[in-house]
Amino acid sequence: MPSMVESQQPNGNISFKHNRNNNNKPNFFAGRQKILEHRKSLPIASVERRLVEVVQENDVLIIVGETGSGKTTQIPQYLFDSGFCHDGKTIGVTQPRRVAAVTVAKRVAEECGVELGQKVGYSIRFEDVTSSSTRIKYMTDGLLLREALLDPYLSRYSVIVVDEAHERTVHTDVLLGLLKRVQNVRSNHIKNQTSVGHKRASNGAILEKENADPCIGVLKQCQGRNLSPLKLIIMSASLDAHVFSKYFGGAKAVRVLGRQFPVDVFYTVNPQTDYLDSAIVTIFQIHSEEAPGDILVFLTGQEEIESVEKQIHENLQRLPEDKRNMKTVTIFSSLPSEQQMRVFAPAPAGFRKVILATNIAETSVTIPGIKYVVDPGVVKARSYDPVKGMESLIIVPTSKAQAIQRSGRAGREGPGKCFRLYPESEFEKLEDSTKPEIKRCNLSNVILQLKALGVDDIFGFDFIEKPSRTAIKKSLEELLLLGALTDEFKLSDPVGRQMARLPLDPVHSKALILASQFKCLDEMLIAVAMLSVESIFYEPREKLDEARTAKKCFASSEGDHLTLINVYRTSIELLEKRKSEVGKDKAEKVMRKWCKENFINSRSLRHARDIHSQIRRLVEQIGLCISSCGDDTLQFRRCLAAAFFLNAALKQPDGTYRALASGEVVQIHPTSVLFRTKADCIIFNEFVKTTNKYIRNITIIDGLWLTELAPHYYAKQE
Ligand code: CDP
Ligand code: MG
């Protein structure tokens, strides 16, 4: 790597050996044999018996193990085999990310030789692939929190494994707090049932001791239930297990040793101005100069991944035929499930696989065959200003721990190389580890859920790490303003309850509830589905004009929400028409072509369609009335104003906007259809902080509507 990257160990001379054995057509028995051998070869296999014993001996166990050692795929199987599901109970395994839950479940079903959704299944928001016979269930941590709303003691589970706990997502943190409570209740319940010294009420409830129990409310509801103790396993890829151990009263922690080959780390000589360009250059440098082996590239999101993928394909076309032996695969959270497993398939013989991934490939999914890692050193993270109440996704430098995890991916099967796209001096400046998400996000969603679970005292809740008082207060205030809480900060009925049942941002849930009253729920369902996916419109740098012209066909002069609705409806109409003419599969193909011609991201659009059908079902379940406002878009915009009044902005004399709730001065994002028009008053959905402060997904409203529709907030103000 002469021009750009320089070795940290200049004399590091490594010989590469890479065995690819993918010419054999697999037959069933060979396949099973291979899987068995693979399972036996994992580092964790040698400690199976001991692991099961420590789980039996400890109610809470922390397992630390290197990525790829087999924790996620093997431990649930070991527990199943040693009888943890004997009485029809389930082993639940939570993941911070949807893709991890899905791909791991598929893999484990394959290892067990069962159909997915039977013994092994998964459940993520908007997708449930389980059945009454499911005993090993992978799911997102957010989903398990939702399940607790219906089953507060998680009584169907004998073991819950909280995987990837080191990621410290906000859902993981809240889940840990909840599980601590549930475990207490369940073991107290058993203790009380078996001990003799207590006075029992005629219905079997425990009367004494209860008053001292912080879970008194929950315990009362336990009456008559047949609850067994709950085993908790916290799994983490990082070494600081003591945080979890301390939180669970000094719980036992064990370490599973992995296999790690040396990885040579390279840094760029100079700082890079455009990390996407540098990543592409580095990929091709590796391809032309380095020995065979797959490349893993860390990018920040779907948009970046898709644009880099496109650029790689274009660059490949310019290479001589014999140098085009490169294949790209992608992995990110919202990738449709049928495409997710492609990342694990080996590239055709003689080809180099380039995996374009988000930080999901850091520890959540282990992809075999990687020998080179390209790490631009950035990650997309949530950031929250609790005073202004503004949350945004921003691209920030990774932590040292993340950089080390990333480089480790290159040394799983043999020595590898990692190319960090920044100078070595920058590494020293990185934070040691990432700040837990609960400290940098809007909390209204989790507070709403905790309230729905009966946790009224949010300030007193036993968080593993407490969010700031300001952040809690701000979110409580927001929920109050949305009508989800009463003046006593209790969950309101029906609005708060209905909002808690919808797996959406509270303000989106509120928009749906209001839309049923404004008789435009049909429109709002589409708007919410389209806002739930990343970038519907695709604007490649080199074809910007073409893309913007295409977008004009759908543009509504009233704003982005109606524009998105136009795209959705036009596409559905076309899809239905083609389906009746040429059948489902061909129709999907026609759709992809149509999307391409119109610079629409077909993956995102399909995802939006799935989300739409799921939330439609949910709003029907909670009894909302679905009707369309037809051409009366005024009604729809008034509804947007009523729901998103906290996201209203007024034009200022200099053409910028002032967000009313936060006082922040913002600009309309160039991708908005309202970019050049200068409406006086608008509502927006997203706040984006890059070098500028932008707002995105915008609709024009009338300023007077705010005092009319949100008088509790605006009446007192000017
Ligand atoms: O959880 P941990 O990082 O310890 O490892 P794992 O996810 O259980 O993965 C163990 C092994 O299974 C790795 O060698 C992966 O490459 C392999 N695996 C796979 O081939 N396909 C999957 N879908 C998941 C895992
Ligand atoms: Mg894992």
Image (cartoon, rainbow, N blue to C red):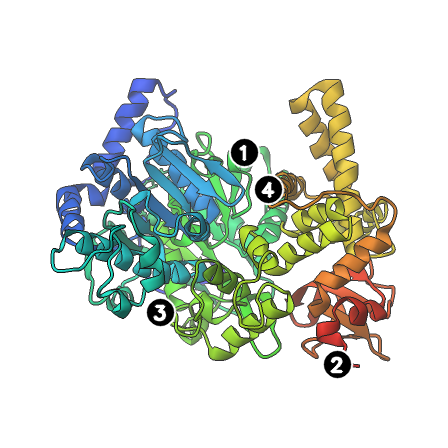
SS class of the residue under badge 3?
loop
Mark 3 to mark 4: distance in Å?
A: 33 Å
User: What kind of residue is marked 2?
Assistant: Lys
Residue under label 3, please give it.
Answer: 462
Mark 4 to mark 1: distance in Å?
A: 57 Å
Viewport quadrant of the C terminus: bottom right
Residue 191 picture quarter:
bottom left
Q: Position of residue 635 (x, y in %)?
A: 83, 54
User: What kind of residue is marked 4?
Assistant: Gln
Task: Name the N-terminal-most of marks 4 and 1.
Answer: 1
| Above or below, 663 relative to 636 | below
Q: Position of residue 357 (x, y in %)?
A: 50, 49
| Above or below, 559 relative to 77 | below
Compared across the picture, whether 239 is left or right of 626 comes to left
Residue under label 1, please give it.
Answer: 322
Task: Name the N-terminal-most of marks 3 and 1.
Answer: 1
Residue under label 2, please give it.
Answer: 716
Residue 708 picture quarter:
bottom right
Mark 3 to mark 1: distance in Å?
A: 61 Å
Nearer the observer, 9 or 518? 518
Examine the rendering and report whether any part of residue 645 can be seen: yes
Q: Nearer the viewer, mark 3 or mark 1?
A: 3
Q: Nearer the viewer, mark 2 or mark 3?
A: 2
User: What kind of residue is marked 1?
Assistant: Asp
Report the residue at 68% width, 48% height from top: 530
> How many other residues sit within 10 Å of disc 4, few (<14), some (14-19) or many (≥20)?
few
Report the residue at 71% width, 63% height from top: 644
> How many other residues sit within 10 Å of disc 3, few (<14), some (14-19) or many (≥20)?
some
